[in-house]
Amino acid sequence: MPGATPVTPLPGADRPHRRQRVGQAALTEGLGSAFAGLALVWVIFTLTGISAPFGLVVCWLGTFLIIYGVLCRMRYGILIAKDRLATVGIWSGAIIAFIALAGVIGYVFFKGFAAVFGGFPHFLTADMTQLGGNAKVSELGVGAAIVGTVEQVAIATVITVPLGIMTATYLASNNGLFARTVSAVVDAMTGAPAIIAGLFVYLLWVVPHHTAGKTGFAAALALAVMMLPVVTRAAQEVVAIVPGSYREAALALGAPEWRVLLRVILPTARAGLMTAVILGVARIAGETAPVLFNAGGFAGYNWNPFSGQQDNLPLRIYELIFQPGKVPIQAAWGTSLVLIFVVLLLFMLARRLGSGKRGGRRFVAWARSRRTVDADL
Amino acid sequence: MTTLLEPPAQYTPPVDDVPIVINRSVSRADRIFRLVMVSSSATVLLILVAVVVFLTKNGWQAFTKGGIHFLLDATWSPDSGHYGAMPLLLGSIAIAVVAVLIAGPISLAAALMINEYAPIKIRGFLTGTVDMLATVPSIVYGFWGLELVSNLQAPPAKWLVDHFGFVPFLRTPTPGEFVQSVFACGLVSAATIIPIITSVSREVISQAPRDACEAALGLGGTRWGMVTDVILPFSRNGIVGAFLLGFGRGLGETMIVVLILSKANHLTTAIMGPNGLGSIAKQITEDFQTGSPLAKSALIFLGLVLFGTTLLVNVVARLVVSRGSK
């Protein structure tokens, strides 16, 4: 509209207004109801002579919700009362989730700390051949298992990554019946039970090779079956974000398709692809069921994944749990701590790369510039 | 006058007015490239086919002997000719159901909290934490469950059975320890599927139309009103899909069940006590290495049944999620 004075919005005016401050009154009501509930339940439990800490907490939560609900109902009406109760419910649900999940990591750290850090690097370098008899935890170690896990995961990655990325690129640029079928298969296989991958490779590889069948390579094959759909699926999503105009521009300039993939699509999607691969690695590094029938679980060092049985971190935990006595359990906690550490380290690495300075920022900058152009039109 | 209506010169179309044919021949390098791409996709397809073929081929022997009794009978003992996979299949399903019933509401609360209730500054951090917890290996969850959770849940479970034994699922035929129960497995499996359900349903919830949410608040609605009347109706399909994905994961859960569940498979509705239902994944893991050829074949067929069930659940879940997000 020509002639109209342009209205300059106040800074921050487009941000939604949120009422999130917990008022003095709400705080008093909440704490008061909690205290009243605790007092009531306490009195009832003491009078009836019940001693059950878990029951106490559950009854306390129930009474608190009732008292708080009635209070809010009386003061503010049914709508506000429902809102307040829902807020309490949602926060408690979320807190339960985070406590449960943080509890796992905390508990493993607590239990495994002594085994790993008592005489520090020894647990990471020694092997489990001393197990049995009356060996102490300080004589055991997960070195052999770390070697096995690293080699098996590396082989699985080498098999999976080219296959997964090529499939993903194909799926991202084709939409025929074949591509859709493969896409559905990848989706379905992402959630396939891990034990099936183990069974499959056992039947495919270990049985035909008889006694020499259980090797690190067989375990790596099973892990690759698990990893392939994960990497393909994630890579498919990453490749799909690469702007179609990049690809078209390159093709229009006369580049052959294979160069477009190698020089345009893969470099643009590099950060995302690295994230996809590392997440896949983190996922399979912790899988037990696929390697259960295939790795063999030899307690000593075996550097050669192609001959002889090999150990593996999750498999070692599994075997230690079923050993009699306390020492194997302590060692199993130590191994769990090492495994969690490895997996979380990989995850952090993936996150860093994913939000990394290079690919990520460049893409964001591109998207922004794109938006301003649209706005000017 | 003669020049006024002079007929125009006969228009003769140029002979060569045909569209230029662009030489669209694909170079040899590109043909090889396309072949490589298609064959890599075909490999992925082939792996799935190979899994099904190998399991069917090796499991067929037991299935032909057992026939339809394979799925219907209640006793699993292949060496003596009983192929009843019913308690195992039902057990796997029961564990997954318990896990989803526990994890579902908690994950939904967590997803709502991250998206709607938490301070904006920590939302990214919480999302990252949930994704991170999805990578914690299931053997670690299983070990944690074996050493800590199954013992913690035993006294409340005993109390429930003692006082509410008349409820069908709580009644237990063999009172005793409550540590190795289907319920304990479901409880621990719930911890492993919370990150999955939370992450998928958070994704779906975040796509609810923001303007409708703000409008609901602007009209004076409470935040809970906005959740029930805008967000949940919009993302209902996606949340159901997320629950189904969690269910699929719970079905295939191996290590937790192997570590916690008692070595029994009885057809019963009791989920709290020992001597309850079995589990396919557990049976395969424990008996496969030591079993006779016939027992192995039967276990492989069981694996096929589990694989088929999980694939079905996953395909349905993906369909529901993708339809929900449109």
Image: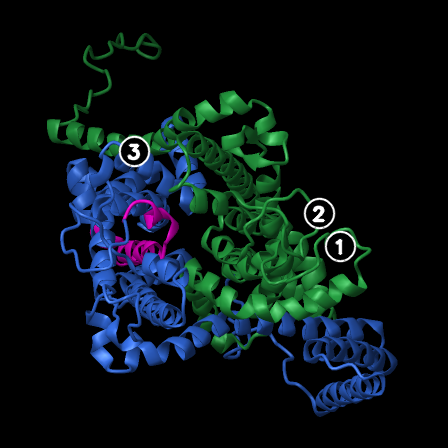
- Disc 2 and disc 3 in contact, CB within 8 angstroms: no
SS at badge 1: loop
- The residue labelled by disc 1 is B171
Q: Quadrant of residue B175?
A: bottom right
Q: Is residue A318 above or below residue B73?
A: below
Q: Colour of chain A?
A: blue
Q: Is residue B308 above or below residue B225?
A: above
| Tag 2 and tag 3 share a subunit | no
| Range of residues picked out in magenta | A266-295
Alpha carbon separation for disc pair 2 and 1: 8 Å
The residue mark sitting in front, 1 or 3, is 1
> Circle 1: is it few (<14), some (14-19), or many (20+) Cα within 10 Å?
many
In front of the other: B202 or A254: B202
Q: Residue at x 45, y 64 (%)?
A: B143
> Circle 3: is it few (<14), some (14-19), or many (20+) Cα within 10 Å?
some
Task: Using the image, name the chain to which the residue with label 2 belongs.
Answer: B
Q: Is residue A78 magenta?
A: no
Task: Using the image, name the chain to which the residue with label 1 belongs.
Answer: B
Circle 3: residue type: Leu
Figure chain in green: B
Alpha carbon separation for disc pair 2 and 3: 38 Å
- The residue labelled by disc 2 is B269
SS at badge 2: loop
In front of the other: A127 or A132: A132
Dominant secondary-structure state across the stretch colored magenta? helix
- The residue labelled by disc 3 is A204
